Amino acid sequence: MIFKHIDEVGYTPDIDCYLRHGGYEVLRNAVTRKPEELIDQVKKSGLRGRGGAGFPCGVKWGLVDRKSGKPIYLIVNADESEPGTFKDRYIIHQDPHQLIEGTMISCFANNVKQAYIYIRGEFPIGARILEQAIAEARRHNFVGPNILGTGYGCEIYVHRGAGAYICGEETGLIESLEGKRAYPRIKPPYFPAVLGLYQCPTIVNNVETLCHVKHIVEMGGEAYSKIGTPNNTGTRILCVSGHVRKPGYYEFEVGKITLGQLLYDVCGGPLPGRTFKAIIPGGSSAKVLKVGERYKGKRKVGAEMVDYDWGIEDVPMDFDCLAMIGSMGGSGGVIVMDDSVNMVEALANINAFYSHESCGQCTPCREGSLWMKKITSRMVHEEARTEDGALLKSVADQIAGRTICAFGEACSWPTQSFVAKFGDEFKGYSENKKQPKVSGSLELI
Amino acid sequence: MIQPAKPDLVTVNIDGKEIAVPKGTNVIEAARQVGVDVPHYCYHPKLSVVGNCRMCLVEMGMPAVDPVSKAPIMDPVTGKQKINWIPRPQIGCATYASQGLHIRTQTPQIKDCREGVTEFLLINHPLDCPICDKAGECMLQEQSTGYGRGYSRFIENKNVKPKRTLLGPRVVLDDERCILCSRCIRFCKEVAKDDVLGFIDRGSYSTLTCYPGKALENNYSLNTVDICPVGALTSTDFRFKMRVWFLKQTNSIDTESSVGANTVVWSREGVIHRITPRRNDEVNDTWMADSGRLLYKAVAAENRLASKETLDALIASAADLLSDAEGAIAVVGSGRSSVEEQFLTRKLADAVKARVFLVARSGAGDGILISSDRNPNVRGALITGLIDKLPSERLDTLAGGIDSGEIKAVISVGEDLVAAGITPEQLGKISIVHLGTHASSTSDAAKVVVPTLTVFEKSGTFINQQFRLQKFAKAVPGKPGMHDDLDALSRLIAALGGASLPSDLHELWDVLTKELPALATTTYRTLPETGLLLDATPWSGLRFPEGETLHFKPTASGEGVKA
């Protein structure tokens, strides 16, 4: 749906191409309808946020304080920084007008007069493409003071980040947009829907989420909700990276494909002579899954409770099923590791990233993330002790659930799950480590 | 004084103890009221809440109600309403009291949270308490003892950060000790209105620093040292001078201006080592100006006056001198004298039928804790009847009187006449009796000099710009050859044929309470440490010079009421 035209030969990111493919027709139609009706369609669609948390978009819009008399802002979160995730960049590069159309429809539905696209600092080309696309859209009156002659006006500004993962956290993003350090805010009281940008009600949505809004308004919420599986509606883009034959972006109906189908059928299976060892299904902060593990339990299908007994290749790729087996759908970044990977070294890499990106505002994450990094780095480069695995888990346990923002979980879940599932590898690392293997990526540590 | 509307009270339950607190009180403050300590670092009652230290995590619950009928759900075991506990711990500083709020601070989960945060704060902390000035009054030290595990699991290298950075002329920063609570940053931004501090870098390498090209040099910079929960910020004046546990604390009042900030004087064996602010939510919150912290240096100044003669001999020569000028005596009183001294000065002037002058002293107010009236006790001069109008009689009248020969003698109570505008030539024409602490042109010219005590060496009261009567106490004894002001004044009055008045502070207060209706309801002993607001209406017609400061807003007529 999102990628409908993207891979077509000759499809270019300019507005003429987009218009040739029926672009902005949905916006044209939307501005003739009642905003409440549009919000209602999004609620009916069951669309869940594609940024990571999977929070229902319609509910998010419903929380916005519309009685305060303050302006409502909409922010497009294009600070795609989760390792393993690269879908938003592709949308921006290939089809920026789809994002702008979705954004303008969302703005109209929520009576937003000013929208910001907060784009990651490392995406300079994306920012340039967006700037150009907005200028084109303004020329065609899709953006500006009087959109399509309706009297409704809305501006979009592109704001580039300066290179920090935490700017993807919505309140950190808001602080950064206000010109401050991207320190996430405490919630309560600073829920963006009430006290967001400049202390005004604010909606922060992911790029892919807003693109879906366009399609929801086009086909109707009811019809959209039939795509995918109940409570996990629509399509989503999965970004597969790592040790598979065909890594890349794949758009599927949510929950209609299992992890096994994705890896073996779509991505071509493991590299020659290798076998899969571990999968991180939703960006590097999601808990790792161990190939060969089985998950049993009961789940709700329709109105009934059904037993399930899955190997990881049987798990449907949707928010609820991945949460059920103790991980998450997250941002859709599927990271595949095969038997060539040493899990201690892989965790050392992840810990290096999170300790570098901790904003440093609150104690557990600030100190804990660096401590975990120092432990894994020492294990790899110097001496590894048998008790290090237990210590790592204990440190991670002291972070998760005790921080201002979800970064606390993001940095502790990998450690918790790596140690829990590959504990033997951590225990025996000192014996197995005959000579330090320093591959290219490990030089970062 | 405008009474605040009675706040809505709500009942909260903290560790099983119920208490009614105003709605919106945070859990740390509410717990304090029931005697439950919620440890914290970044939270400060007078600064905004950021919730970054995570030390004050508590378990929070609300009474369970049926989602549809809103009827309470009862617990069959206890027979009480069931409590829905939130599984995630919440920060006490940003959890506010609402009806029925339940808090638990003593559960295994909270114990673990506190141990975790303490461990995290200590892994990169240098643990150099033996050479740290904060030791003994360090929140990290105390709370690590109270809530930490007592051993370390950290075997990695600690982070290296800048040491001994001079942030400004009075504040030194040790970044390795810093726990990044951001109290100092918030103080500069919110209270001192001088946004100069910030963090650079990120994560555990975050470093406190001044913005490029700026320095922490505002007149409130030392408050950051007071509120620093660790030894990261230290005062250049106090650094390495004395261990805090050796120091005696004495409550005092800042004499810089009519704000009357409440202070604590820290001394040992008769020597003062520092002055810090004392919390008074109606006057100075928990702050004071840097300039007021250095006033103790006057105690041991080289130009302190001291006499070899006894007080009796000095009083006798003064009486002798003044008897020659009967009917031509003027008294110069001071807005720096205490209420008690001003009362006696009035009696002294009455005894010799002298005209009274009060030296005005003004400067620019800073809108925070220094007002434009640089006398701490002009209101006292009004209440004691030393003067009856404002501005008081001008000193150029005195100069005219000297020139015309109308005035032949002046009793100067703690004021330097030259600094107040009388020329040295004019001083030469008259006989001067001077009561004072430091050498000046007046003490040089005076025929009789009675060395007296500074505010740190005596007890008394001041009345600040809000008409708040506040007391200060003797921190250190006066040196030999210096005489108590009250003693000197009462003896002088007696020697000049005036009434016999007590020189003991408490006995004198018995007289004050009887004679001055404004002070009828209190005595020095019963006066609360936070002061007593007096009725200002008799003075509502006067024009006071002060502009707005922290808890003071002048009214149109010039009379001040509490903000």
Image (spheres, coloured by chain):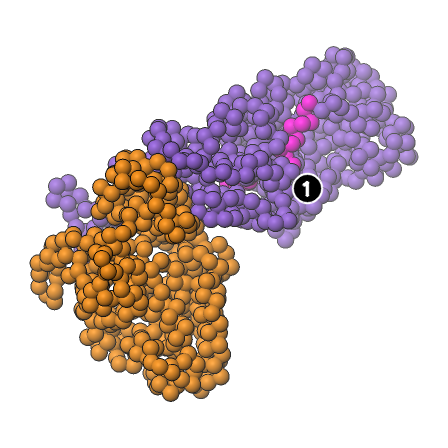
Chain colours: A orange, B purple
Q: Position of residue B267 (x, y in %)?
A: 58, 23
In this rendering, does residue A354 appear at all? no
Q: Nearer the viewer, residue B173 or A83?
A: A83
Residue at the (21%, 52%) spot, across then down: A290
Magenta span = B280-300
Main SS, magenta residues: loop
**Is residue B421 found left or right of A18 in the rendered image?**
right
Q: Position of residue A149 (x, y in %)?
A: 44, 87
- How many numbered circles does the render carry? 1
Q: Residue furthest front?
A: A273
**Is residue B395 found left or right of B150 in the rendered image?**
right
Residue at the (59%, 29%) spot, across then down: B238
- Residue A395 lies in what quarter of the image? top left
Screen quadrant of the N terminus of chain A:
bottom left
Q: What residue is pinned by disc 1?
A: B373
State whether residue A24 is above or below residue A413: below
- Residue A190 lies in what quarter of the image? bottom left
State whether residue B518 is above or below residue A177: above
**Is residue B429 found left or right of B304 in the rendered image?**
right
State whether residue B50 is above or below residue A246: above
Q: Nearer the viewer, residue B316 or B20?
A: B20
Q: Is residue B282 magenta?
A: yes
Q: Chain of mark 1?
A: B
Q: Nearer the viewer, residue A239 or A38?
A: A239
- Residue B510 lies in what quarter of the image? top right
Q: Position of residue A52 (x, y in %)?
A: 31, 61
Counting other residues with Cα less than 10 Å from the Cα at mark 1, is it few (<14), some (14-19), or many (20 or more)? many
Q: Nearer the viewer, residue A418 or B387?
A: A418
Residue at the (71%, 27%) spot, across then down: B345
State whether residue B21 is above or below residue A261: above
